[in-house]
Amino acid sequence: MKSAPTIAFDYAPSRRLFAALALVTALATLAPWLSALGWPACVTLDMLVLGGAATAAGRLRRPRFRRIAHQAAGWVLLDRDGGERLAGLVDWRQLGDMVTLDWRVDRRRRFRIVLAPDNLDADTRRRLVLLLRSLGPDADATAPLR
């Protein structure tokens, strides 16, 4: 029997992602004022942008899961209270030095993260990418959730 490779790491949100969110929010709130829209439309658009950015920042700041592990049983996510959840990996992408992971938890809910150099060391990120490549393109996407 072939043994499954294992990996485990703690997850904390990336400061790079917060900085990008702040920059995009600032530019998006400035854009209506540089257009030919009237001031009521500009204020309305700014409120919508700020509301969306606040929601995104809240989700980034307090992730549902703090620890991620791949074991023989599959992907296991540990929530803030220490409870374990079995998850199916739906998709992953490597974008330069960043890795995005997308899991399906509890059959419907999704949990997505971005791993960058500021929230996961290079060696762990390299081992994670090797593990993901060894699992194949759809290794966990069809795995049943318990």
Image: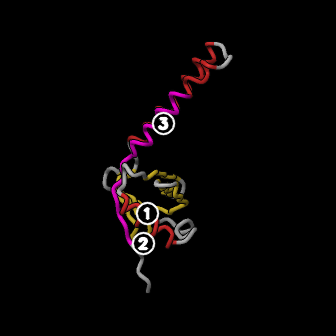
Q: Which residues are magenta?
A: 6-27
Looking at the image, residue 54 lies above or below residue 75: above
Q: Residue at x 42, y 42 (%)?
A: 16
Percent position of residue 117, x then y:
39, 52
Assign a secondary structure to mark 1.
Answer: strand
Q: How many marks?
A: 3
Farthest top residue? 39
- Identify which residue, 23 or 2, lies in the foreground: 23
Looking at the image, residue 103 lies above or below residue 24: below
> The N terminus appears in which quarter of the rendering?
bottom left
Assign a secondary structure to mark 2.
Answer: loop
Residue for badge 1 = 86
Residue for badge 2 = 73
Q: Residues within 10 Å of mark 2 (few under 14, many from 20)?
A: few
Q: Residue at x 54, y 23 (%)?
A: 47
Residue for badge 3 = 21
Percent position of residue 81, x then y:
31, 51
Q: Give the numbered dot on residue 36.
A: none
Which is more foreground, mark 1 or mark 3? 3
Which color scheme is applied? secondary structure
Assign a secondary structure to mark 3.
Answer: helix
Q: Earlier in the sequence, mark 1 or mark 2?
A: 2
The amino acid type found where label 2 is placed reads Ala
- Identify which residue, 27 or 106, lies in the foreground: 27
The amino acid type found where label 3 is placed reads Leu
Q: Earlier in the sequence, mark 1 or mark 3?
A: 3
